Image: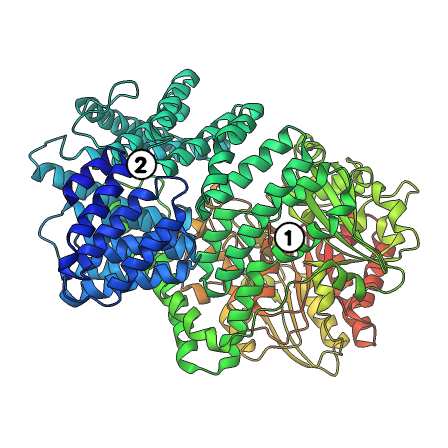
Amino acid sequence: MTDYATLEHNNRHYQRAADLMQQAFDESSAEGDTHRRANMLLSKLVSLSFLNGTEKEQQQLYRQAKRILDTDTDTLAWMPVNFYIAANYLKSTGQYQEALDMYNQGINHCDHIDTGFNTDYIDLVTGRYDLYVNGLHDMTTAYRLIEQDMAAFDNRAFNYYTTDQLDYLWAVYNLTAKNSEEVFTVFSYFMRITQATFSIFSQAGGNVAQMARYMVRLYAEFIDLYAFYDDWSKRIDLRSLSAEQRNLMDTYKSQFNDVVKALSDIMEQMGLSATSPIPVSVDEEVFYAFLSAQEKFYSTIRPDEQKVREVMDRHMGLTREANPSEFVNVCLYRMNFLNGKGLYGETKTLYEKQMKPYAEAHKLADAVRLPVASLMAATCQALGDARSMLPFARTYYKEVKDIMAHNYPLLTEQEQNNMAKRFGDPSFWLSATLATYPDKSKISGEVYDAVLYRTGLQLRSQRETRDAIMRSGDKELMALVDSLNRLRGEMERTQGYKPTLSSEEAQRIYPTVAKQQARINALERTIVDRSAPYRSAAPLDATWQQVRDRLHEGEAAIEFIYAHPLWMALVVTPGCAEPQAIPLSVADSLSNALQRLGITNPTTLARKLYNERAIDLYSLLWRPLEPTLKNISRIHYATQGLLSTIAFAAIATPDGHYLADRYDLCPLTTTAQLLHPATERRPKTMVAMGSIYYSDRQRQQVAAGDMTAARGDDELTFDDFSNADTTVRGERASMRYHFKYLPFTRQEISDLRQAMAGTTMRVAEGSEATEQTLRQQLRQAPDVLHLATHGFFIANSAQAVSMPFFKQRAVSVDDAMQRAGVALADAEDTWTGAASPADDADGILTASEVANLNLRGTQLVTLSACETALGNYTFEGMFGLPRGFKQAGAASLLVSLWSVNDKSTAMLMTSFYRRWMQGATKREAFRQAVADVRKAYPQPYYWAPFVLLDAAQ
């Protein structure tokens, strides 16, 4: 009877299948309450789940089955599958904790009788992974369990693969983040899947029909990888690649084509075609996967809109009634496809006629609600319907915020990075809605709060974890952190950058790096878990009202935001009823104007923007604000994205002055900083470095009085790096292969000694200003850290891998925190590749290394160097040196936007410290120091590069 019921279910006769299972249950009553009979009830529940209006009956069946599950312990064979079905039902109804309990009971039973990696066990553990990721949003536990289970999987040392094991590898692979940071882990899993697939294929005697399911999955994944690679290759600037790298890209593409063609031939052997009947040897799920692959094939590899539509029509027709969840996935893909073609009206119709009715009849899974909200927000915006867009924008923000709020405190840094890349800016669609919303005051406060939440989200979490470790006094925990740093160094040294990595080298290196990455991931999670008891409770979200209540008369707080497609400003003033949302300009207007200048060097660009006023920044970014800023003299402001590179103080006003002449401009990483102002006190301790010899040769040249030789020849032109005053020469920029000696930093350090008289100073100069010395001096955090040296920021990985320093650190080039840093003694040989000392003694202090320092209690970090305010900007802030020092615990930063002039910088620093020590606040001392420099050097290039960040008091 049960077999007959299963046959009816597979033929989609769901009511008939349910009736037969009930009949089997009734006829076996003499058996009593056994797991076998519970399975009949649960199987009936599964059949009813395909029929609308049966929810109450499903609940009754579950309660009846659960009573048996809680009492019967005899019929062992049925236990795992029953717990699995019950868990899936609970998960589908949002009862996640109850579902977890069912999964755990099933897994514990399998462990007790040592079933090994059989079908039941694999179904249970992979179902539990999915529950943690997509239901409980607990990625930390999911990844930890995956690592534990994969270790057990590897320890079994199978003599051959089974399809059950292959299913398990696929489940793990599908839950692994697909990004550059996890590339070795992903590659390792995928190669094992490929190996296992063809191993089983060989064991089956090359029988294509038996391997249909797995060959189709492999085919679909290769097409996904091809599509990803094709999209990536279109987005990168090929001009930044060498001829060798471009040839390698062509080779990879050719190899992809060969593999896809070979797999396509196998698909034909199986009789698979998007228009033909489903072959008898292929089940429906496999055929759906094949159709999905064909949709992507005709979308990306061989674009053919008509064929894509034909395949999607077939796919939707087959799944609309038979498989609702698959139908939703096809609808999502079609919506993406239509939006990509600019057919937003079709997308809206598809949603309203197909997706929305389903959503009203069934609860959309968490994994579906987000992409639906994002797609429909984009669709409504393209159609100019901001009111319809708002509910989707709110849904997107709420869902992503809930996921991040639940997970961020528990995730490792890498997992946080992965999550940020996966979900993006939670406030993006709310901000975009604001751009065209008719009554902006209705939602401006909502958007302001969302911006406050997202900005620095990761920084807050990571800083709290680091602070907790430092507060704990747990020596074992601190030793784990040291071990983690060593492991990261080992992985970097395992693989240097090789643009022509052979397959033999890849096979040798990738498994090693994959194992190192796994050890790093496991250790990071151990650290996160062990530090949990020391972490403070998560603070409540900051609100715009709290920011408003911190303002004094004559002050304003501004969040500059990207609200697609505009730059906008959210302005809060004392006593305001809501933030004022002010459109500034179309974002492309600024970026296009900058591109037309054709300048990539920040220093040359600064001259054009602020000395020559090549772009009217006032009209683009400030003029619309003026009516709101009447009677305002002090402005606390935070920027986003491209605006983080703009020196607002140097924006010229129509009357021939600058914004710095009208306002006291106070830049912040977020205006929420006003809720946690720093306590101003005169510094008592200081660590300073300057007059650094970057090579032994420089030391000899300076000792011989040959300053010209020590400073080297500029690679850039005279016009790029100076003005008509030839006595002012020598900017603090790292040339591509050479750190020059900076003679004025000797005087700067000497002046600092005088200005900081009365403080305890630890100064290192010349060859003594090493990275190891700095680390030793920072074992006790000083009030002030001052580094007068070269700084660097490499904008992208393509540029980085052309530099010797990064060629030996290929694993790091995708990390912006590794591409920003400062140079200390003996950095020259490391930078040019002549030497490869340990990372903590190589003379190059990267932002990533800075983040691991302990600067809790440090009032100010001054980076008297070039471009130290720059980095890669994401929705939650800038990733570069400022991020590193803030993460390390520094309160305020004095950093630069472009390559600074040696002499004018020394003047600024001396004036700043003297005034600060005389009793002025940091902010006021900085304003007066800038005024001093302006008297000697009126052009903004000289007085405007530095910004004092987060000096709220």
Instruction: Kindly tell me whether residue 810 is visible in this rendering.
Output: no
Give the position of the N terminus as an image quadrant.
top left
**Direction from residue 349 to residue 148 in the image, left or right:** left
* Residue appearing at x 27%, y 48% in the figure: 189
**Label 2: which secondary element:** helix
Q: Nearer the viewer, residue 614 or 119?
A: 119
Give the position of the C terminus as an image quadrant.
bottom right
**Direction from residue 170 to residue 92 in the image, left or right:** right
User: Badges 2 and 1: C-beta atoms under 8 Å apart?
Assistant: no
Residue topped by disc 2: 221
In the displayed structure, 391 sits above or below 856; it is above
Residue topped by disc 1: 867
Residue 145 picture quarter: bottom left
In the displayed structure, 756 sits above or below 358; it is below
Query: What amino acid does circle 2 point to?
Result: Glu
In the displayed structure, 226 sits above or below 728; it is above
Work out how far the residue at label 2 is from the one at label 1, CA to CA, in angstroms.
42 Å
Query: Where residue 336 appears, x then y in whole percent?
Result: 49, 31
The number of discs equals 2
